[in-house]
Amino acid sequence: MSVGVQALKEENSGTLCESVKTLVAMNNANAPKEYDFTFDLPEGYRLVKDYDYNDEFDEYDCGQIFVVNDQDETVCTIDPAWAKDANGEVVETMYEINGTTLTQIVNTDENTAYPVVTGSASHPNKTSVYYLKKAGVKDLRDKYTEQGALKLCTGLVETAASYKQPVVGVCKTFVFINETYSGYKYASWNSVYAKVGKKYAKVAVVFRWRNGGKNSGYIPKNENVTVVSKIS
């Protein structure tokens, strides 16, 4: 068995994106079938499977693991587990979580051709700021009034981040001035708009982007880079 760890950096459109890739080579049938990765997390942080994180987005789950902070925000995304044998055949593999330890289980059998290579990559989330004028907040309120949290968050991405097509679910929190609001605690843009004082000429919208899934947040056709909204 051999293990390799690679730190990756890539600049895309002026944005430096980082990730860490881990590869494990199982040389023969005597190699361990389970591999532990222990994370040194701050107090209150935890590992959670994507389908356990938010039921509203279950249709987008793909086997990722999130590192979640003490505010219940994702701060890092770990790609779904994968493994392939020497013939390029997919080998069944999965993650299990025990506290701050993530275990990858690889289920080989008598038909598996060695060596088997398995691994994953972790991507710290990106945060970017877009300044939205009061009129822009009003436009969003009028467009998405009385619609639920999913439309609310999509509206932020679609409008403030200048997306031509909506990217569902990549924004979990947003910030007006210096106050953070959960996108799931406000039923509509009306309630959000009411929180923005009339004295403010513009508001700061902070996006926390994460990787993966059908709602990936990746830059199209480049799965190693996280999308970051434009800064105005």
Image: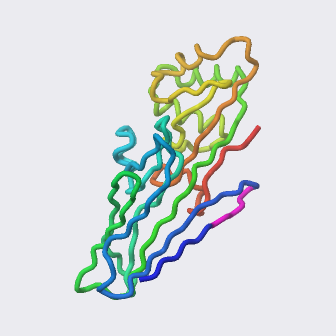
Magenta span includes 55: no
Q: Quadrant of the C terminus?
A: top right
**Left or right: where does residue 33 sit relative to residue 84?**
left
Residue at 62% in and 48% down? 126
Furthest residue toward top: 198
Magenta span includes 12: yes
Viewer-proximal residue among 82 and 97: 97
Q: Position of residue 193 (x, y in %)?
A: 59, 17
**Left or right: where does residue 56 sit relative to residue 166?**
left
Residue at 48% in and 74% down? 23
Q: Where 98 sits versus 53, above or below?
A: below
Q: Position of residue 25 (x, y in %)?
A: 43, 81
Q: Quadrant of residue 176?
A: top right
Residue at 48% in and 22% down? 186
**Badge count:** 0
Q: Give the magenta-colored segment's residue range.
A: 8-13
Q: Quadrant of the N terminus?
A: bottom left
Q: Quadrant of residue 18?
A: bottom right
- Judged by its main secondary structure, the magenta piece is strand
Residue at 47% in and 20% down? 146
